Amino acid sequence: MGEIRNDWTKEEVAAIFNLPIMELMYRASVVHRKFQATGEVQVCTLLSVKTGGCPEDCAYCPQASRYHTEVERHNLLGYDEVLTKALIAKENGSTRFCMGAAWRNIKDNEDFDNVLEMVKGVSNIGLEVCCTLGMLTEDQAKKLKDAGLYAYNHNLDTGEEYYEEIISTRNYGDRLKTIENVSNADISVCSGGIIGLGESQADRVAMLHTLATMKKHPESVPVNALVPVKGTPLENNTRVSVWEMIRMIATARIIMPGAMVRLSAGRNEMSVEEQALCFMAGANSIFAGEKLLTTPNPDVNEDKAMFELLGLKPREAYKEVLV
Ligand code: SAM
Ligand code: DTB
Ligand code: SF4
């Protein structure tokens, strides 16, 4: 155990995923110590640069215009506001800054030109710049790369079979194509998913299997717990338990040993003890700052205290990832 492989079978992934939890955590911890710097955690900040009004129907998302949520819509933020937020994120210890837009896909228009300027600006202050702007073409990926984009987030969200239960306005193949375009432009791929959508354990295994059998593993794999938002079709879903998060994180760590595994949405409801178990199980990245895109996240000072308590240190920017 503990080599970088892209030929995992679904049965192998399922066998790991279904191990008794203590054994699974132990094995993930061993792999973690072999492939990752002990105690290092990447700290990323998110900013929603364009919020709400999205034409897609992702059942979990508070930003889809067809659901009536309390999210306040706004058009693309201005350059200065974004740069100010990026500087604050840097001062607070983040090394990656991720700009999200509630778009179905990138359009070749003035908004995109403005985003390219933001990418240049954020990159110039020494932060790894990441974007999540929906689907993109190979040409758009190249433009982002030329502007200094370091990473692009595009989640698979769930297993292929369950996908159509959650989103009908695009398909799994569209998702995979965008990831391929990002990768071909030499941009670091960030792709993971959400648990708590009503999917089965087999759907979770299927998603992890798809990620781990990509030609090259994503450099970062966010694991989100659904944040049920009032007004969305999934508003009444029960929150997943921390053990389910640990199972996802530990399996991702074992089958994609070189990737950064990000403990993403859901931290606001977790105790420090629960988060510590996630770090033991192989998580080595978090989103910091009081807001994710539209929902609350732990306060920066709480996270600083947690890092101190657990003896964790922030990972430096631009460190190589072996996947
Ligand atoms: N519109 C772009 C897209 O869908 O790729 C980018 C922004 S979208 C909000 C980014 C990711 O946020 C989604 O792929 C999903 O994984 C995550 N997300 C959205 N709403 C969430 C929620 N309520 N709970 C957990 N994760 C969520
Ligand atoms: C990811 O996997 N999780 C982040 C980021 N990538 C873009 C987004 C989480 C969003 C949670 C719901 C919200 O705040 O709107
Ligand atoms: Fe739009 Fe992205 Fe939300 Fe789906 S997840 S509704 S594409 S913003």
Image (tube, rainbow, N blue to C red):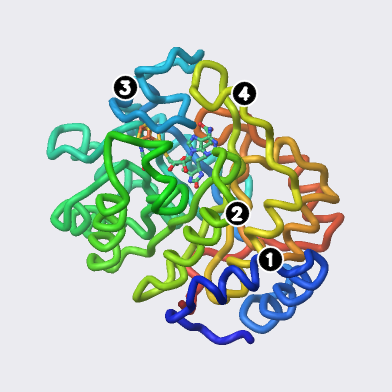
Q: Are marks 2 and 1 in contact (CB under 8 Å)?
A: yes
Which corner quadrant of the image does residue 183 belong to? bottom left
Callout 2: SS? helix
Q: Nearer the viewer, mark 4 or mark 2?
A: 2
Q: Which mark is residue 236?
A: 4
Q: CA distance from mark 3 to mark 4?
A: 29 Å
Q: Which mark is residue 75?
A: 3
Side of 26 where 62 appears, left or right: left
Side of 179 where 213 appears, left or right: right
Query: Residue 63 placed where, x, y %?
Result: 42, 25
Q: Which residue is mark 1?
A: 18
Name the residue rendered at 62%, 29% in the picture.
237
Name the residue rendered at 48%, 76% in the picture.
9
Query: Residue 214 placed where, x, y %?
Result: 37, 71
**Dot 4 surroundings within 10 Å: few (below 14), some, or many (20 or more)?**
few
Residue 184 vs 190, above or below: the answer is below
Q: Which residue is mark 2?
A: 201
